[in-house]
Amino acid sequence: MYAKLAWRNLRRSLADYGIYFMTLVFAVAIFYVSNSVTEQPAFLSLSESQRRMARSAVEGMEWVSTIMTGVVALLVLYANRVIVRKRSRELGTYLLLGMDQGHLAALLLAETSAIGLAALGVGMVTGVLTSQAFGLLVERAFHVMAPQRDFVFSARAALATLVLYGVVFLAVAIWQAASIYRQRLIELIHEARKNEEIRVRSRPLAALAGLLSAMTLVTAYGLADWVSRSDWLDPTDPRIPLGVALGIAGTYLLFAALAGLLTGVRRRAGGWLARGLNLFLYRQVTSKINTHAAMLATIALMLTFTVCAMSTGLSLGAIVRRDAEERAPFSYMVTASDPEQDLSGLWALFAAHGVADAQMVEFVTVDAGLRGADLMLPDDAERFMADEEFDWAAWASVSVMPYSAYRSLRAFKGYPEVPFAEGGYLVHAADSDPAVAAGAAAWTRALIAGQPLELAGVTLRPAAPQVFSESMGYQFGGYGAMLVVPDEVVARLLADLADRSQRYLVAEVPGEEPDRLAEAVGNWVSARIREEGWISLSSRTETMAETYVVEAVFIFFSFYVGIMFILISATLLALQQVTDAVEHRQRYAILQNLGADDAMMDLTIARQVGLYFLTPLLVALLHSAMALTALNRALSGETGYQVVGPASLPTLGVFALIYGAYYLMSVQNCRLLYRPRTAD
Amino acid sequence: MAAAERILEVVDLAKTYGSRGSVTHALRGISMAIERGEFVGVMGPSGSGKTTLLNVISTIDSPTSGRVWVGGQELTALGRREVARFRRKRLGFIFQDFNLLDTLTLRENIGLALSIAGAPAGEIDRRVTAMAERLGIVDALDKFPYQVSGGQKQRAAAARALITGPDLVLADEPTGNLDSRAARTLLEALSDLNRDLQATILLVTHDPFAASYCSRILFIKDGRLFTELVRGEAPRQRFFDRIIATLAELGGGGADVR
């Protein structure tokens, strides 16, 4: 008999709390998918260095998903409390009918565990199926091809999912059964009747809360703006946590104030409110806002985090990648602090791997003590050195590079050849820093004016009336400006300035990488690392591979947390709509008697649910707009990139899709729950 | 009195519940009619079919056979959308448990019926106040239902039922949850509205005291019309005695006499 009762209750609960159940399923599935990444074929085919990099990334992911499991556990706890409260009358009736409390607790334990078990089962199946498709995503993210695509099943991930979620569900079930066991009958019977009386709160107090909220939020926004305008974004800046804390406090205050200001307003029916069911709708929403203020504020904050994370995740990943292209502009680049360093072994090594001599260039650059100001016309230089914002363009040191090497590097990058003349010089500056950009204009003026330059006793004249700005990595004009001079001038400079020079070997290997070349070059370089001076290697393959991993982690993290937060927010909203179903159903029944037709009621239900979904979203969008603008400014000052770029649009689309789908499901569910059933 | 207008006409109404195995005949062919301005009571013991009759007339339930006209409109011919329209234009309801919206003030509750019917916003407040004056609840208008007495709640419900000027007001045990003083106030108010506004009221009750305010009473037993009492010019006390006598004859309902 008890089993039958539990089964029937379970089926009814699943109908009422379908959305909650679905979220559990998603949570389990996402957890499995993220934990099975390491066993994706794409992951297994990563290179050793990539895998090392990726492994630490995966550890990060697993941390994230474990923390999210904690958040899901809180949701489960909350949801179960809500469900028991809603069913307290029914549970009390069982007791009145003579069921003993042990049995009632067991009944509840069975029901809750069964829901958990079902969620776990369905979630695992969904997860295993999703992870097949997820493999393709991992391939694209890591830019590798899986050797073959078999059906992937990770026993380790499955076990982790079963254990972690099993513990969460079981713990909540036991906790709940225990609390029912302790509860007294009278409390159960009366619980359901504890309807919220529409308290007319102290309006001045609410107004004060509103004022405080406005003040804290404005301060928080102001702090964000202030921090974003500072020259250097310091992650330990105390203004950041202060701003976040103020933002959180302000949000809670805002909803508290809204609740206080909107409830119990004794309005005379008139205007918009007097039309159709508008007044009813207004009262429907405001009558409950007191109870729900804290929840709505929490949801607004979660959505803020989601919008920020999702709209920056993709772009941050893209920034990391573009930054990597700056760091590794060529297939291989070996840099030695000693200009006398013998690199002939490397030439042999490359040749042995089939890399032609024409694909390589070896050269020396010298820091001749030149500054940006030296390349400017005198009055320009004076002006720049006095300028507070752009003085860096004048002070930045300018390294000197031989023309033959410059020509080779341009050829490797596929840039057009530049004119050069005996006794000429060129200026190259690819730095996107605003100061350098302003400096470039001054340098161009000097070049057009034909300003001569004295270097190692030779007078050089501009060979081209323009500054070249193609990207060649930060060593070569990516940071300040670079001067290109005839080879013999560099040789002369080197004689005096050997300790301020560096030797480079650059190789550009188009197309397929020769087998094991990277490893051989790596070994050669590490064998020559000495105590004095340094020698380093950057290879594009390796840098990019590492970057893809970092990028993937950014995207993964932002989407994981973002999607989970949307699911949880939407579930909280849906749960709360179901909780109040009994009251709402009575009210809609009255409307029906008053002659409201189905269309009117459907529309009102959609608007009622919509207001609950929309209010926290609007607050979240406002917060996000402020936070993202500040973040954009702070980071673009530093990196020159827009954080919230066009890449944010598809992610916001994903956000809207999920949130919208949950909204529509809630509306549908509420229509079933609220609308009185008619006889015909 | 001028030629009476027929507000409600019920012809040979039957309602059967259940299927082959166990059939319940709630109504077994009832015919009745109500003219504009009448205040008609329906009495009968539990299970006699009062509630089913009211549900069919109020379009909450549909009949198995027979026909019902309200204000010349045949109910069975109405579609789902038209039913809602019909309800808000032609009917007013008063329930035993008031059925006021707890989130709205009395003023808003009364005005809501007009809003749903699409009355111009500017007119609503004036009409609500006028109706509240008639029912003596002006002082309570800006209170929420939980802040006023049961009698005030039921008078607000009556105001809400009558404010749209419906053809027919259906009152289902409106005094059931009221003490005798509040019940008397409500019934007197309904009587006044019936007289002054020519409101047509159909009152379903098992309380002979409430029924004694009616001008005519239909007694139902086992789904059929049992008898009819007309008050005529008789004083209310005399009419009350006749109701008690009829109830005794009817059996069952007499136990409710207080």
Image (tube, coloured by chain):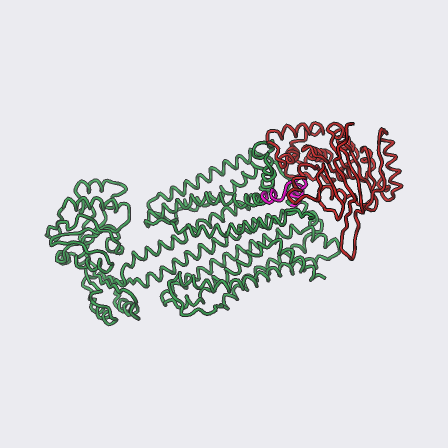
Chain colours: A green, B red
Q: Residue at x 75, y 30 (%)?
A: B194
Q: Is residue A441 magenta?
A: no
Which residue sits furthest front? B3
Q: Quadrant of residue A386?
A: top left
- B212 vs B65, nearest the viewer: B65
- Horizontal and vertical percent for residue A655? 47, 51
- Horizontal and vertical percent for residue A68? 50, 56
Which residue sits furthest bottom? A352
Q: Is residue A588 magenta?
A: yes
- A321 vs B176, nearest the viewer: B176
- Does B2 appear above or below A4? above
Q: Residue at x 52, y 61 (%)?
A: A29
Q: Is residue A255 left or right of residue A508?
A: right
Q: Is residue A229 left or right of residue A367?
A: right
Q: Is residue A599 left or right of residue B51?
A: left
Q: Residue at x 71, y 28 (%)?
A: B134
Give the quarter of the figure containing the N terminus of chain A: bottom right
- Horizontal and vertical percent for residue A408? 20, 60
Q: Is residue A450 visible?
A: yes
Q: Which residues are magenta?
A: A585-604
Q: Quadrant of residue A629?
A: top left
Q: Main secondary structure of the magenta part?
A: helix
- B29 vs B168, nearest the viewer: B29
Q: Is residue A583 visible?
A: no
- Horizontal and vertical percent for residue A348? 22, 70
Count of picture labels: 0
